[in-house]
Amino acid sequence: MTSTNAYASQHLKNGVLPEGTIIYTNYQTAGRGYFGNKWESEDGKNLLASIILYPSFIKPEDQFYISMSVSLGICEFLGSYVKDSVIKWPNDIYVKNDKIAGILIDSALSGEKIEYTVAGIGLNVNQKKFSISVPNPTSLNLLSGKDFNITDCLNKLLTVLDKRYKQLISGDTESMKREYISKLFRYNEWSKFMDINGSFNGRIDTVADDGRIVIEKHDSKFYEYAFKEVEFII
């Protein structure tokens, strides 16, 4: 399989699949993240899955809430095994300073509504060695020294994600957003960033409903950035 998101999107073009349909594989030949980034995964070692959703109750401009709910679900799942999982804006999950998971949200819009969403998840479970081209990776195995049953991990993760999605359906977005912001990597800490003008010191203030991150600089002014307009210098 090239990727679970690509497989799901192709089948959705041929007809509606039930909400909550899970596409799962042991290996992807072309795993990807946002903006064409690649996702490396050793065969049979990690959790690779996509979930089909129909979040028509969410306005297209607010679709980042889907990413929030998935991110929080992954962090909640990880909390059963490791400490200090955080969300590195916009779509990575870290444990301390190392990346353990990535999220790829693909949505199709029809007019003023979301027709469907494919929520892709790559979670490092039992992989111990990674390519030198992959920066700061980690896995549940590396963090705990234990091997995990990936099917069990998937089932536990899906249970938590279902709870988070129901929170979204209920309209409880304010508390979800507060929790999401509190879980952000280096939230409210002065850190180094890079934007089109070069490196700067800044502090994450909040994330807007549309997913833009708001960073305070030392001039006490606040700047909004969309995806790929700013990045951490770690």
Image: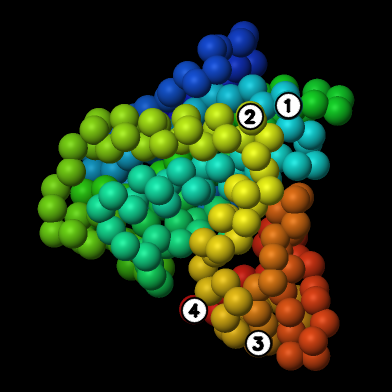
Please name the residue shown 56% across and 42% down the image: 69
Residue at 65% x, 87% y: name it: 201
The disc labelled 3 sits on which kind of residue? Asn
Give the CA separation, mark 4 to mark 3: 12 Å
Tag count in the figure? 4
The residue that mark 3 highlights is 201
- With respect to residue 57, does 40 lie above or below? below
Q: Quadrant of residue 181 in the image?
A: bottom right
Are circles 1 and 2 on residues that touch, CB within 8 Å? yes
Residue occupied by mark 2: 169
Q: Nearer the viewer, mark 4 or mark 2?
A: 2
The disc, 1 or 2, on the residue closer to the chain's N-terminal end is 1
Residue 67 located left or right of residue 108:
left
Judged from the image, the secondary structure of the residue bearing numbered disc 2 is helix
Q: Nearer the viewer, mark 1 or mark 4?
A: 1
Q: Identify which residue is drawn at 21% across, 49% down.
A: 126
For this orientation, the residue located farthest to the bottom is: 219
Looking at the image, tell me whether mark 2 or mark 3 is earlier in sequence order: 2
x and y, in percent, of residue 142 in the image: 21, 61
Residue under label 4, please give it.
234
Q: Do callouts 4 and 2 mark residues in contact (Cβ within 8 Å)?
A: no
Of marks 4 and 2, which one's residue comes earlier in the chain?
A: 2
Q: Secondary structure at mark 3?
A: strand
